[in-house]
Image (cartoon, helix red, strand yellow):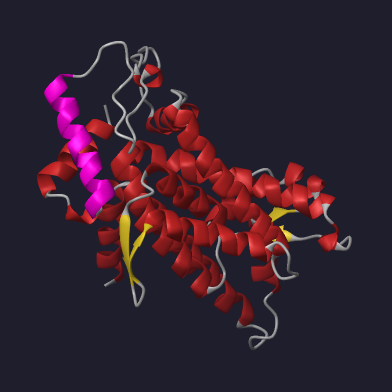
Amino acid sequence: MLESIWEDLKREFSSGNMITRLILVNVSVYVFINLLWVISGIPSGGTDHSIYDEVTRYLSISSDPWFNLTHPWVLVTNMFLHQGFMHILFNMLFLYWFGRIVGDLIGDHRILPIYLLGGLTAGLVFFASANLLPYGDGAIHYALGASGSVMAIVVAAGVLAPEYIMRLLILGDIKLKYIVAALVFFDIVATGGTNNTGGAFGHLGGAAFGWLFVSQLRNGQDLSAPVNSMVTWFKDLFSGADKSRKPKKSNKKKTKFTIIKGEGSRDNTPPPQDHQEKLDKILEKIKKEGYENLTSEEKEFLFNASNK
């Protein structure tokens, strides 16, 4: 049975989109860290989980600058680490719901950069707030979880498709802009309390990056390009790719993408008129009826257009 599960996970990871991969990584880390909690408590009858506490601390970002300098990996590992079930459940649900919208509109290849850069921004804002604001009382604090990364994707989705309709349980159909505004508002309110104040500031940092990313993309600056280049470099490094070959130059960086406002491509070569008209009609349909009401042909057309 375990072998079958492992094969299923490998297949999903290799064939799935970036949202699927991020969810699988987060869930895998969650399973590992909770198994560690069980195993570390067995010798003491469940009273001592010091090994678990030590591992989670060494994977979390700290308010102590020296700890972060001597453990630089925490800038990345903290955004994949969850302890509570409800914490990971809502983060993964939001990642799936909102990440699907972002991936469909501006391309799956931009999901990982938004996740990583949003999480990094959230971590830095947490660190700054913990050291500059009085809520710390001199104590060392630690932050973990994908909330900052997820908030970056949530706000990016809201900026890209504010009129997108989401159907919520009990509440019914609500436009995306109101859902995103409510989530940001809750984090703003949380900064005024005493519970997880640093985390709330981190969430807002991730949200701010999501807005910045889309704004820069509309202005022709793709912040995902450096991250994707680095990911490609690591892939080539570990796969033993032929380094003598010069990588092909991509023109994607020079392209100004069309996103939700129905603006045409601002590349030097304008797209064919019929292609642009079809794209504008699909974007207008999303505004009025929501993405879920697109036909499979329209979704495929939009996906292909977002990757050009």
Residue 168, quarter of picture? bottom left
Segment colored magenta = 272-289
Instruction: Give coordinates of residue 205: x percent, y percent.
Output: 62, 48
**Closer to the camera, 205 or 178?**
178
**Which image quarter holds the C terminus?**
top left
Side of 150 where 247 appears, left or right: left
**Up-down: is 57 above or below 232?**
below
The answer to whether any part of residue 145 appears in the image is: no
Side of 248 where 72 appears, left or right: right
Dominant secondary structure, magenta: helix
Which residue lies most toward the bottom here?
A: 45
**Closer to the camera, 212 or 148?**
212
Q: Is residue 214 magenta?
A: no
Which residue lies most toward the front here?
A: 288
Instruction: Give coordinates of residue 149: x percent, y percent.
Output: 52, 50
**Up-down: is 255 above or below 121?**
above
Q: Is residue 286 magenta?
A: yes
Residue 249, quarter of picture? top left
The answer to whether any part of residue 75 appears in the image is: yes
Instruction: Give coordinates of residue 207: x percent, y percent.
Output: 55, 49
Instruction: Give coordinates of residue 246: x percent, y percent.
Output: 37, 12
Q: Residue at x 47, y 62 (%)?
A: 91
Q: Residue at x 15, y 33 (%)?
A: 278
**Which image quarter holds the N terminus?**
bottom left
Q: Residue at x 68, y 85 (%)?
A: 44
